[in-house]
Image (tube, rainbow, N blue to C red):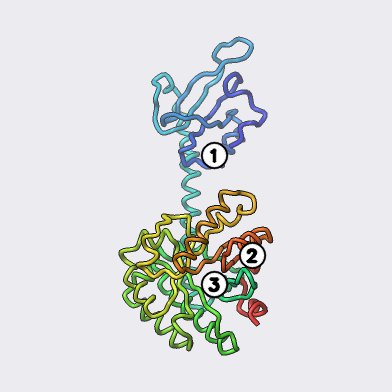
């Protein structure tokens, strides 16, 4: 929050000074309303301390005598001498804060309710779409797999990415229906590509622990594979490292059953969570995906480069597949090539695109 507007110093100037605690949920709008007030000249500035609205005094530079009220907005009081704010001012400030917070909560609740309803309508009206991002061999730049990424298409034609609705879908349970549709649609698309001559292509699909905990999840996968005419080994399920470890007791059996059938299991965002090797072999993890936070700085940060090389060496020793995420520059690609990384994925090669658009990378 900027306190540099043409107001007097919060210590030596005249007028009222309001400090907004950083650990309160008071929006910037509150300070703006106070600054625009005609009845009170206010400067918001951050101070630590207890709560409540407290009043101290500042001094004028000419007389060094008390001349202005200093109000501190917090949660309580740590100094009895600061409890003399006028009741009217206190009530007014709290009303503004409460009103702003109520408005923010109302907007958040409205957006959440709209998205939940929009998700339900999108499923009913077949407005979910899949985009695909290639995973390619670092040495030959040949596409060996694609990752299916779900989008929600609004009635106006706008595409909403998964980061804006997947977490909500998991909380409301809608992820089960959405996830089933994604697996079925992705398998069908892979079946069409294989019939067109792309027999070696693999399909990667993100899954939520909520799906893996469903008793019929293995049956859902079996049905999708059979209906599309593909093999279990053509399908790769991606789950993030944190989600896997936090839900391990509930998803372990499902992953083992699917692995035994040939389904590949990829550990997404590897290196950002627990980075424990204890579950790689028992769960038959087939691939680790190095998170972009390590890939982005590898051409400039030696430490990031060392970490990536260690992960590559580990994967080679354990016989695991490895994909580097977020490859965007020629320097990153060259580093991965020289370090022996087998696969890459990122905007430097191709962004997620529709099935029709991505086919130019496949044929």
Residues tagged 2 and 3 counted as in contact (Cβ below 8 A):
no
| Image-based side of 301 in relation to 169, left or right | right
Q: Residue at x 55, y 26 (%)?
A: 17
- Image-based side of 289 in relation to 330, left or right: left
Cα–Cα gap, marks 2 and 3: 13 Å
Of the residues under marks 1 and 3, which one precedes in the sequence?
Answer: 1
Q: In percent of the image, x 44 and y 74: which residue is there?
A: 264
Mark closest to the chain's N terminus, 2 or 1: 1
Q: Residues within 10 Å of mark 3 (few under 14, many from 20)?
A: many
Separation of marks 2 and 1 at Cα, in angstroms: 41 Å
**Quick one: SS at disc 3?**
strand
- Residue 37: image quadrant is top right
Q: Is residue 13 above or below residue 147?
A: above
User: Which part of the image, by quadrant, shows the N terminus?
Assistant: top right
Residue labelled with disc 2: 347
> Residue 147, which numbered label?
3
Mark 1 vs mark 3, foreground winner is: 3
Q: Is any part of residue 156 visible from this angle?
A: no
Closest to the observer, 301 or 101: 301
The residue depicted at 39 percent of the width and 75 percent of the height is 259
Q: Position of residue 307 (x, y in %)?
A: 53, 53
**Residue 157, horizontal then vertical, whole percent:** 61, 72
Do residues under tags 2 and 1 come within 8 Å of each other at their CB atoms? Answer: no
Task: Write down the residue under mark 1.
Answer: 30
Please say if 200 is above or below 170: below
Q: Earlier in the sequence, mark 2 or mark 3?
A: 3
Q: Residue 107, position in %: x, y?
A: 50, 54
How many other residues sit within 10 Å of disc 1, few (<14), some (14-19) or many (≥20)? many
Give the secondary structure at mark 1.
helix
Tell me the crowding category of disc 2: few under 14, some 14 to 19, or many 20 or more residues within 10 angstroms, Cα based. Answer: some
């Amino acid at each position: 929050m900027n306190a540099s507007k043409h107001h007097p110093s919060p210590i030596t100037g005249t007028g009222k000074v309001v400090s907004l605690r950083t650990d309160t949920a008071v929006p910037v709008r509150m300070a703006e309303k106070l600054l625009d007030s005609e009845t009170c000249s206010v400067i918001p500035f951050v101070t630590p301390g207890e709560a409540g609205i407290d009043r101290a005094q500042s001094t004028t530079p000419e007389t060094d005598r008390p001349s202005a009220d200093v109000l501190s907005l917090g949660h309580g009081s740590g100094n009895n001498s600061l409890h003399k704010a006028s009741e009217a001012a206190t009530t007014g400030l709290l009303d503004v804060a409460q009103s702003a917070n109520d408005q923010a909560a109302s907007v958040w609740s409205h957006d959440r309710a709209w998205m939940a309803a929009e998700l339900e309508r999108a499923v009913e009206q077949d407005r979910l779409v899949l985009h695909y991002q290639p995973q390619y061999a670092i040495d030959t730049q040949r596409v060996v797999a694609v990752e299916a990424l779900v989008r929600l298409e609004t009635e106006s034609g706008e595409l909403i990415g998964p980061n804006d609705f997947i977490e909500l879908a998991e909380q409301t349970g809608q992820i089960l229906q959405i996830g089933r549709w994604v697996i079925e649609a992705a398998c069908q698309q892979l079946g069409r590509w294989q019939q067109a001559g792309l027999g070696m292509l693999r399909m990667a699909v993100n899954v939520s622990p909520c799906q893996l905990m469903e008793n019929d999840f293995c049956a859902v996968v079996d049905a999708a594979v059979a209906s599309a005419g593909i093999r279990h080994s053509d399908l790769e399920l991606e789950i993030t490292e944190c989600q896997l470890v936090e839900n391990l007791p509930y998803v372990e059996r499902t992953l083992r059953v699917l692995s035994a059938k040939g389904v590949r299991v990829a550990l997404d965002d590897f290196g950002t969570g627990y980075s424990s090797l204890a579950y790689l072999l028992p769960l038959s993890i087939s691939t680790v995906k190095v998170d972009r936070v390590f890939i982005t700085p590898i051409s400039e940060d030696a430490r990031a480069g060392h970490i990536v090389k260690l992960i590559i060496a580990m994967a080679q020793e354990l016989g695991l597949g490895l994909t580097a995420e977020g490859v965007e520059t020629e320097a990153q690609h060259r580093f991965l090539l020289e370090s022996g990384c087998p696969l890459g994925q990122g905007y430097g090669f191709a962004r997620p695109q529709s099935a029709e658009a991505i086919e130019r990378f496949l044929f």
